[in-house]
Amino acid sequence: MVRLVGECRDLGDDRLAWRGRLTEGIAKMIDADLVFSGEVAGCVALRPRGLGSVEWGWENGFDREFFGRQTAIMLEDPGYYPTMNLYFARFASDDGVCLSRRQLLKDRAWYASDDYQRVHRGLGIDHMLWCFSELKRSAASDVSAGVVVNRARGRRDFKARERLLVRETHAAVARHIGGALAGHEDVSARALPPRARQVLACLLQGDTDKQVAARLRLSVLTVNSYTKAVYRHFGVRGRAELMARWIRRGWGAGFSWDEEP
Protein backbone atom coordinates (compact mmCIF):
# COMPACT_ATOMS: atom_id res chain seq x y z
CA MET A 1 0.00 0.00 0.00
CA VAL A 2 2.79 2.42 0.93
CA ARG A 3 4.66 1.56 -2.26
CA LEU A 4 1.56 2.19 -4.38
CA VAL A 5 0.97 5.61 -2.79
CA GLY A 6 4.63 6.47 -3.40
CA GLU A 7 4.38 5.46 -7.05
CA CYS A 8 1.31 7.68 -7.43
CA ARG A 9 3.20 10.61 -5.93
CA ASP A 10 6.10 10.06 -8.34
CA LEU A 11 3.56 10.66 -11.15
CA GLY A 12 1.73 13.36 -9.21
CA ASP A 13 1.82 16.21 -11.74
CA ASP A 14 -0.22 14.15 -14.25
CA ARG A 15 -3.70 13.30 -12.98
CA LEU A 16 -4.23 10.66 -15.68
CA ALA A 17 -0.94 8.92 -14.97
CA TRP A 18 -1.22 8.71 -11.20
CA ARG A 19 -4.87 7.70 -11.32
CA GLY A 20 -4.01 5.02 -13.85
CA ARG A 21 -1.39 3.66 -11.48
CA LEU A 22 -3.84 3.82 -8.57
CA THR A 23 -6.62 1.90 -10.34
CA GLU A 24 -4.24 -0.82 -11.53
CA GLY A 25 -2.58 -1.05 -8.12
CA ILE A 26 -5.85 -1.41 -6.22
CA ALA A 27 -7.12 -3.99 -8.70
CA LYS A 28 -4.04 -6.15 -8.22
CA MET A 29 -3.88 -5.58 -4.46
CA ILE A 30 -7.34 -7.05 -3.81
CA ASP A 31 -7.90 -9.10 -7.00
CA ALA A 32 -10.58 -6.90 -8.60
CA ASP A 33 -11.70 -7.07 -12.23
CA LEU A 34 -12.78 -3.49 -13.03
CA VAL A 35 -11.84 -0.31 -11.15
CA PHE A 36 -12.83 3.34 -11.62
CA SER A 37 -11.08 6.29 -9.99
CA GLY A 38 -11.97 9.96 -10.33
CA GLU A 39 -13.54 13.10 -8.92
CA VAL A 40 -17.24 13.76 -8.46
CA ALA A 41 -19.17 16.91 -7.55
CA GLY A 42 -22.48 16.92 -5.69
CA CYS A 43 -22.01 13.75 -3.63
CA VAL A 44 -23.34 15.21 -0.38
CA ALA A 45 -26.24 16.84 -2.23
CA LEU A 46 -27.04 13.41 -3.75
CA ARG A 47 -26.72 14.83 -7.27
CA PRO A 48 -23.39 13.26 -8.32
CA ARG A 49 -21.72 14.70 -11.41
CA GLY A 50 -18.50 13.19 -12.73
CA LEU A 51 -15.55 15.55 -13.23
CA GLY A 52 -13.27 13.01 -14.87
CA SER A 53 -12.23 9.43 -14.26
CA VAL A 54 -9.71 6.74 -15.17
CA GLU A 55 -10.64 3.07 -15.57
CA TRP A 56 -8.76 -0.20 -15.41
CA GLY A 57 -9.96 -3.65 -16.48
CA TRP A 58 -11.89 -3.31 -19.73
CA GLU A 59 -9.56 -5.91 -21.20
CA ASN A 60 -11.13 -8.44 -18.81
CA GLY A 61 -14.10 -8.84 -21.13
CA PHE A 62 -16.51 -6.09 -20.05
CA ASP A 63 -18.62 -4.16 -22.56
CA ARG A 64 -17.27 -0.61 -22.53
CA GLU A 65 -19.78 0.68 -25.09
CA PHE A 66 -22.69 -0.63 -23.00
CA PHE A 67 -21.27 1.11 -19.93
CA GLY A 68 -20.89 4.35 -21.90
CA ARG A 69 -24.56 4.28 -22.87
CA GLN A 70 -25.65 3.69 -19.28
CA THR A 71 -23.36 6.46 -18.02
CA ALA A 72 -24.93 8.92 -20.47
CA ILE A 73 -28.35 8.12 -19.01
CA MET A 74 -27.07 8.49 -15.44
CA LEU A 75 -25.62 11.92 -16.23
CA GLU A 76 -29.05 13.05 -17.40
CA ASP A 77 -30.89 11.50 -14.44
CA PRO A 78 -29.03 11.39 -11.08
CA GLY A 79 -31.80 9.16 -9.70
CA TYR A 80 -31.21 6.49 -12.35
CA TYR A 81 -28.76 4.58 -10.14
CA PRO A 82 -30.20 4.65 -6.59
CA THR A 83 -27.71 2.19 -5.05
CA MET A 84 -24.93 4.72 -5.55
CA ASN A 85 -27.04 7.33 -3.77
CA LEU A 86 -27.45 4.89 -0.86
CA TYR A 87 -23.66 5.00 -0.56
CA PHE A 88 -23.49 8.79 -0.76
CA ALA A 89 -26.16 9.10 1.94
CA ARG A 90 -23.80 7.17 4.26
CA PHE A 91 -20.76 9.08 2.99
CA ALA A 92 -22.36 12.41 3.98
CA SER A 93 -21.89 11.51 7.67
CA ASP A 94 -18.82 9.25 7.35
CA ASP A 95 -16.23 10.79 5.02
CA GLY A 96 -13.96 8.11 3.55
CA VAL A 97 -16.24 5.18 4.37
CA CYS A 98 -15.68 2.06 2.22
CA LEU A 99 -18.83 -0.03 1.74
CA SER A 100 -19.64 -3.09 -0.30
CA ARG A 101 -22.83 -3.58 -2.27
CA ARG A 102 -24.10 -6.11 0.30
CA GLN A 103 -23.64 -3.57 3.10
CA LEU A 104 -25.99 -1.25 1.22
CA LEU A 105 -28.45 -3.69 -0.31
CA LYS A 106 -29.05 -7.37 0.48
CA ASP A 107 -28.96 -9.95 -2.31
CA ARG A 108 -32.72 -10.40 -2.75
CA ALA A 109 -33.37 -6.68 -3.17
CA TRP A 110 -30.23 -6.21 -5.27
CA TYR A 111 -30.98 -8.86 -7.90
CA ALA A 112 -34.53 -7.53 -8.25
CA SER A 113 -33.37 -3.92 -8.49
CA ASP A 114 -33.32 -1.79 -11.64
CA ASP A 115 -29.63 -1.09 -10.94
CA TYR A 116 -28.73 -4.74 -11.35
CA GLN A 117 -31.12 -5.45 -14.20
CA ARG A 118 -30.33 -2.32 -16.25
CA VAL A 119 -26.61 -1.85 -15.57
CA HIS A 120 -24.76 -4.60 -13.75
CA ARG A 121 -26.28 -7.62 -15.43
CA GLY A 122 -25.51 -6.27 -18.89
CA LEU A 123 -22.02 -5.20 -17.88
CA GLY A 124 -21.28 -8.57 -16.25
CA ILE A 125 -20.36 -7.32 -12.76
CA ASP A 126 -21.91 -7.94 -9.35
CA HIS A 127 -19.99 -7.28 -6.14
CA MET A 128 -18.73 -3.72 -5.69
CA LEU A 129 -16.95 -1.42 -3.28
CA TRP A 130 -17.46 2.35 -3.06
CA CYS A 131 -14.91 4.55 -1.29
CA PHE A 132 -14.98 8.37 -1.50
CA SER A 133 -13.26 11.21 0.37
CA GLU A 134 -14.14 14.90 0.31
CA LEU A 135 -11.40 17.08 -1.17
CA LYS A 136 -10.59 19.83 1.33
CA ARG A 137 -8.19 21.58 -1.07
CA SER A 138 -10.74 22.01 -3.86
CA ALA A 139 -11.77 25.57 -4.69
CA ALA A 140 -15.35 24.33 -5.21
CA SER A 141 -17.59 22.93 -2.50
CA ASP A 142 -18.92 19.36 -2.38
CA VAL A 143 -16.17 17.84 -4.54
CA SER A 144 -14.95 14.37 -3.67
CA ALA A 145 -12.48 11.81 -4.99
CA GLY A 146 -13.32 8.15 -5.03
CA VAL A 147 -12.79 4.66 -6.30
CA VAL A 148 -15.40 2.12 -7.36
CA VAL A 149 -14.10 -1.45 -7.35
CA ASN A 150 -15.89 -4.32 -9.11
CA ARG A 151 -15.72 -8.08 -9.46
CA ALA A 152 -17.21 -10.07 -12.33
CA ARG A 153 -20.55 -11.79 -11.90
CA GLY A 154 -20.10 -15.19 -10.26
CA ARG A 155 -17.10 -14.18 -8.15
CA ARG A 156 -17.12 -13.83 -4.34
CA ASP A 157 -17.87 -10.71 -2.33
CA PHE A 158 -15.09 -8.49 -0.94
CA LYS A 159 -13.84 -9.40 2.54
CA ALA A 160 -13.43 -6.98 5.46
CA ARG A 161 -9.64 -6.97 5.03
CA GLU A 162 -10.00 -5.97 1.36
CA ARG A 163 -12.42 -3.18 2.25
CA LEU A 164 -9.93 -1.92 4.84
CA LEU A 165 -7.06 -1.97 2.31
CA VAL A 166 -9.09 0.09 -0.17
CA ARG A 167 -10.17 2.56 2.51
CA GLU A 168 -6.65 3.12 3.87
CA THR A 169 -5.05 3.31 0.43
CA HIS A 170 -7.58 5.82 -0.82
CA ALA A 171 -7.34 7.90 2.35
CA ALA A 172 -3.56 8.09 1.93
CA VAL A 173 -3.99 9.25 -1.68
CA ALA A 174 -6.93 11.63 -1.18
CA ARG A 175 -5.14 13.81 1.35
CA HIS A 176 -2.57 14.73 -1.34
CA ILE A 177 -5.02 15.58 -4.17
CA GLY A 178 -4.67 19.26 -4.96
CA GLY A 179 -1.15 19.17 -3.55
CA ALA A 180 1.40 16.51 -4.51
CA LEU A 181 -1.28 14.82 -6.65
CA ALA A 182 -2.85 16.89 -9.42
CA GLY A 183 -6.62 17.17 -9.34
CA HIS A 184 -9.14 17.85 -12.08
CA GLU A 185 -8.64 21.63 -11.65
CA ASP A 186 -4.91 21.43 -12.41
CA VAL A 187 -3.45 22.26 -15.80
CA SER A 188 -1.84 19.14 -17.26
CA ALA A 189 1.48 18.93 -19.08
CA ARG A 190 -0.09 16.21 -21.21
CA ALA A 191 -2.18 18.90 -22.96
CA LEU A 192 1.00 20.43 -24.45
CA PRO A 193 2.29 19.38 -27.89
CA PRO A 194 5.02 16.67 -27.80
CA ARG A 195 7.95 19.07 -28.46
CA ALA A 196 6.71 21.48 -25.78
CA ARG A 197 6.56 18.58 -23.30
CA GLN A 198 10.16 17.70 -24.14
CA VAL A 199 11.21 21.30 -23.55
CA LEU A 200 9.31 21.33 -20.24
CA ALA A 201 11.11 18.19 -19.07
CA CYS A 202 14.48 19.75 -19.90
CA LEU A 203 13.58 22.98 -18.07
CA LEU A 204 12.51 21.04 -14.98
CA GLN A 205 15.85 19.21 -15.06
CA GLY A 206 17.69 22.56 -14.96
CA ASP A 207 18.79 22.96 -18.59
CA THR A 208 19.36 26.42 -20.04
CA ASP A 209 17.80 27.30 -23.41
CA LYS A 210 21.12 26.57 -25.13
CA GLN A 211 21.37 23.18 -23.41
CA VAL A 212 17.78 22.38 -24.36
CA ALA A 213 18.52 23.32 -27.98
CA ALA A 214 21.56 21.03 -28.10
CA ARG A 215 19.75 18.18 -26.38
CA LEU A 216 16.69 18.32 -28.65
CA ARG A 217 18.59 19.41 -31.78
CA LEU A 218 16.54 22.59 -32.13
CA SER A 219 17.50 26.21 -32.63
CA VAL A 220 17.67 28.45 -29.56
CA LEU A 221 14.95 30.61 -31.14
CA THR A 222 12.65 27.60 -31.47
CA VAL A 223 13.34 26.54 -27.88
CA ASN A 224 12.58 30.07 -26.70
CA SER A 225 9.23 29.92 -28.52
CA TYR A 226 8.34 26.59 -26.87
CA THR A 227 9.48 27.92 -23.48
CA LYS A 228 7.10 30.88 -23.72
CA ALA A 229 4.27 28.50 -24.68
CA VAL A 230 5.03 26.41 -21.58
CA TYR A 231 4.96 29.50 -19.36
CA ARG A 232 1.60 30.58 -20.81
CA HIS A 233 0.18 27.08 -20.37
CA PHE A 234 0.98 26.99 -16.64
CA GLY A 235 0.29 30.67 -16.03
CA VAL A 236 3.81 31.48 -14.83
CA ARG A 237 6.11 34.36 -15.78
CA GLY A 238 9.44 32.60 -15.94
CA ARG A 239 11.66 29.64 -15.18
CA ALA A 240 11.97 30.37 -11.45
CA GLU A 241 8.20 30.49 -11.02
CA LEU A 242 7.77 27.29 -13.03
CA MET A 243 10.31 25.47 -10.84
CA ALA A 244 8.74 26.90 -7.69
CA ARG A 245 5.36 25.56 -8.80
CA TRP A 246 6.75 22.02 -9.09
CA ILE A 247 8.65 22.21 -5.81
CA ARG A 248 5.79 23.81 -3.88
CA ARG A 249 3.34 21.15 -5.02
CA GLY A 250 5.81 18.37 -4.24
CA TRP A 251 5.41 16.84 -7.68
CA GLY A 252 7.73 13.95 -8.42
CA ALA A 253 10.24 13.45 -11.23
CA GLY A 254 8.35 10.66 -13.02
CA PHE A 255 7.37 12.57 -16.15
CA SER A 256 4.98 10.08 -17.75
CA TRP A 257 4.08 12.77 -20.32
CA ASP A 258 7.70 13.19 -21.48
CA GLU A 259 8.62 11.83 -24.88
CA GLU A 260 12.33 11.59 -25.55
CA PRO A 261 13.32 12.35 -29.17
Image (cartoon, rainbow, N blue to C red):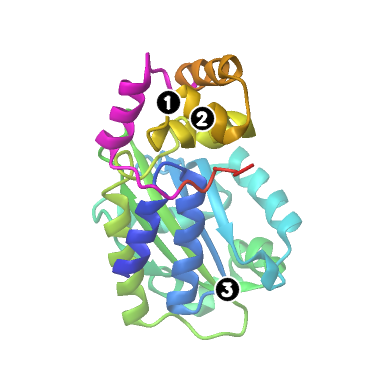
Whether residue 140 can be seen here: no
Which quadrant: the C terminus? top right
For disc 1, the neighbor class at 10 Å (few under 14, some 14 to 19, many from 20) is: some
Q: Can you tell which quarter of the image residue 170 is in?
A: bottom left
Count all numbered tags in the image, as a single digit.
3
Mark 3 lies on residue: 33
The residue lying toward the viewer, choosing from 62 and 116, is 62
Mark 2 lies on residue: 212
Would residue 195 be found to the left or right of residue 87 on screen?
right
Mark 3 residue element: loop
Mark 1 lies on residue: 208
Would residue 127 be found to the left or right of residue 100 on screen?
right
| Residue 122 vertical placement versus 218 (above, below) | below
Image location (x, y in percent) of residue 236: 38, 18
Q: Can you tell which quarter of the image residue 123 is in?
A: bottom right
Q: Amino acid at mark 3?
A: Asp
